[in-house]
Structure formats: structure tokens, C-alpha cells
Image: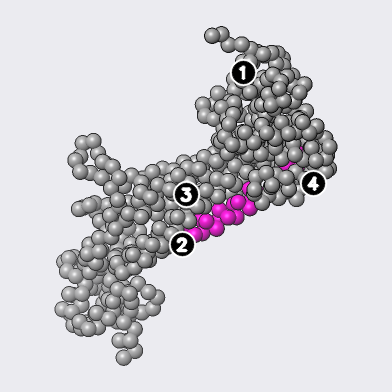
Amino acid sequence: MSIQYRSEHDSVGERSVPKDVYYGVQSLRAAENFPITGLAVHPEQINSIAEIKKASAITNLEIGLLDKRVADAIVRACDEIAAGRLHEAFIVDPIQGGAGTSLNMNANEVIANRAIELLGGEKGDYALVNPNDHVNYGQSTNDVFPSAGKLAVLKLLVRAQIQLERLSEALEAKAEEFDDVLKMGRTQMQDAVPIRLGQEFRAYSRAVRRDIARFERAKDEMRRLNMGGTAIGTGINADERYLRRIIPNLSKVTGLELVQASDLIDATQNLDGLVAVSGAVKTCAVNLSKMSNDLRLMSSGPRCGFSEINLPPRQNGSSIMPGKVNPVIPEVVSQVAFNIIGNDVTVTMAAEAGQLELNAFEPIIFYNLIQSVETLTYAVHTFVDNCVTGITANRERCRDMVEHSVGIITALCPHVGYEKAAEVAKRAIETGAPVRRLILEEGLLDEAALDKILDPYSMTEPGISGKELLEG
């Protein structure tokens, strides 16, 4: 069956558009101009732009600048898009020239054509509902596109926080479970002083709590929108009544607490808020990757490594080495982190590259920022479910390494002096003899004193282990 076409035109000229599609000529040109990623715009970005168009139609109806019949049709079309319908009609690439004009016009055309249908007309009959004069009334790409991007990021940050809360709780649970597991702490990959495994996991949880707080501040950055600023923030072609009402109406439509930027010119040209949010996501990724590195080290082995903990086995680790199981979940978390760090560099450079009243590189900023938040969310989800909750401790292995380590000599320094302790440490390293045995052989301390000084909790809490011996 042959495809039928309808004729549309824009300032560039006439084009044939498939008759049954919801997009129009400007969307078609953009799809041809920007075959960059081969990916679709993120669903939340599409939903958010539909919510903005809905709020704008409601506002323009309230102030008498849009016919009720047209406004109602636009609102219905936007509701369908926000519910997940018609997303296939958004054909532009997420990375695009024109500061986001392509996506804005894609939305305007899809909403207009669906509204035309709802009014009983045929797609392309823009006399009924016009993409620019009705759907885009009182708006510009330059306030719609960044606002839609911020709304999408805000929603994704909420989801990320939920997963980070789960991770923090899982780490806290492990901190309690492992509170009595004494092991060697390490600095610069060398034996240091004893620490409890639970203390290490509690430290991980504290880092995640700070990330959650940073995400909360990031959400505040994303709530400040430049809607009403239109082209460069001066509000040209936006009725003053629209300017006052658009954010309250958008808050009602989205169910989110949104605020209008206090200076719309500043909010239109400067994207430092997006850099700050990307930085918060990057910081979280760094924490997650460092944690993953630690887990891989502590679980290394199972016979010839640290083997202090066991990670839950998730899949075969080799096509040639039977029985090998790799730490695949921490590995994927680190890979996600590497990508997020790269995305942050892109966001930073793109924000810096803006000129004068507008930044033309917002598409690449939102493409990378949205990817960062979403992939971090998925990474944390699998990290919790497929790794952290199933970690177990090799208690005897941890204890044995402490007892045979030279690191415990540090706790003895206040009792025998640094120089003597260093001599014992050197002998222990040369002979392989336990520090405890050497101390007893030299008669530096007796069994009872050693038991008090080398008490696991005393060595892993602030203060001098065995202080009462010094005072006695």
C-alpha cells in the first residue's frame, strides 16, 4: 500500500509529510538534519514538555488569549502525551542544533495535529490549531526547552534518591551485622591499624547520606524555571498576566513545587545550576566507584587475595577458567561512574560555551545529565539488590590477618615506645613471627596486659588502648 502525503510549508519551503503522522515539516527537517545518536528523546523530557504546553494553554485560556475549544483540545492532547501516548511521533534526535528548537517544534506539531483530530479536523489543517500561534503562544524554545529539561532531571533525581536511600539502609544493616568483625585497616595498600568491618560499612553509608543531601539541593536548583522569559529573558510576547500565572499553573499540572527564577535574563543565559547538579551526580558516582573498588579488593581471591568478605555470586566469570566468579556488580557500578564523570566534563564545557543571552548547547547538556542521573539510578538499584544485601564476612580470615599483622604494633607504642615497637615490627616482618609472641618473648608486656591493649574494641575506638595500664 502506497504512502499518502500532505503538503506543509515553513520558512525554508514546501515539504511532503506522510499524511497520517502527527509530526510536521519542522520535525521532519530536524530528523534529517540531526541523525546523531539514533536514540529517541527521553520519555520524561517528552512528558515534561507536554506538561509545559498544557500549563501554557490553561494560562492563556484563563487570561482570555486562547479560545476554550482550542485550549481544551490542546490540554487533552498534552494529557495523552504525558500518559505515554504519541511518543513515537517525537522523531528528533536528543542531540540537535538550534538550542532545542527542534524538540519544541516537534512537540508543537504533535500537540497541534492531535488537537486538530480531537476537533474533528485532518492533520495538517493548522487553521484549526496552529503549532506556533496556539500551542506555542506566549512561549519560546528558550524558556520551554530548558524548563522541560529541568523538570525531567528533577523527576529523575527523585527516583535516584529513592535508590540511594535503599543503599544507605542496606549499608547500615551491614554495619550492624559486621560490627564485631575485626580486620586490618590499610593505608596506601599496606597494613595500618585494626578496624571493624562494620565501621567501614558505616563510613560508606555516611558518604551516601551526604550524596542524598546533595541531591536534595540539586532538586532545588531544578525547580527554578525561566518560563515566561521567552526569547532572551525579557518576556517579549508574553502577556504580564501569563508571566504571573504560568509557574503556579505548571506546579498544579506537574504536582511539583516550582518557582520562577527571580531574574529571567540570568536564568535564560546562565546554566551554572545545571553544572552544579551534574557535579552532585558526579560526586555520588565517585563515592560509589570508590566503594566498589573496596568491595572488589576485600573480596579478592577466594584463596590468594584478601578474601575478607564474600560477594554474592551472580554469574560465571570466565569462558575458559572453570568455577571463576567475578565481582561483576561492583565492576558495572564503576563503569557507570566513569561514564558519568565524562558526562560531567561535557556538561561543564557546554555550559561554559554559551554566548551572551543564550546557550545554544543545552541539548547536549540535558542529554548527558539525564543519562547520568538515570544510569546512576539503575546502577544503585542493582548494587543494592545484587551485591550489598548479600555480602557476608569471612570472620576467621579477618581475625587471623589481624593477629599475624604487624599493624597491631601501633597500639603498643604508648606502652613500649616507638623505637622499641619499630624494632619488634622489623623482626616480625623479617621472621614472620606474630607481634604478640615477640612482645612476650622479650618480656616487654605480659599476657594480661596484651589482652587489654589488643582488645578489638579498644583498638578501634578513639583513645589509648590499655590506658589504665599506663595510669597504673
Which residue is identified by label 1? 20
Which residue is identified by label 2? 206
The one of 274 and 408 positioned closer to us in this rendering? 274
The mark found on residue 285 in the picture is 3
Residue 151 located within the stretch drawn in magenta: no
Mark 4 or mark 2, earlier in chain: 2
Amino acid at dot 3: Ala
Disc 4, disc 3: CB below 8 Å?
A: no
The one of 12 and 243 positioned closer to us in this rendering? 243
Q: Quadrant of residue 63?
A: top right
Residue 222 located within the stretch drawn in magenta: yes
Mark 1 or mark 4, earlier in chain: 1
Disc 3, disc 1: CB below 8 Å?
A: no
Q: Quadrant of residue 177?
A: bottom left
Mark 3 or mark 1, earlier in chain: 1
Disc 4, disc 2: CB below 8 Å?
A: no
The Cα–Cα distance between marks 1 and 4, rounded to whole angstroms, is: 38 Å
The Cα–Cα distance between marks 3 and 1, rounded to whole angstroms, is: 44 Å
Mark 3 or mark 2, earlier in chain: 2
What is the x, y in percent for residue 239?
A: 83, 39
Near mark 2 (Cα within 10 A), the count class, few <14, some 14-19 or many ≥20, is: some
Disc 1, disc 2: CB below 8 Å?
A: no
Amino acid at dot 4: Arg
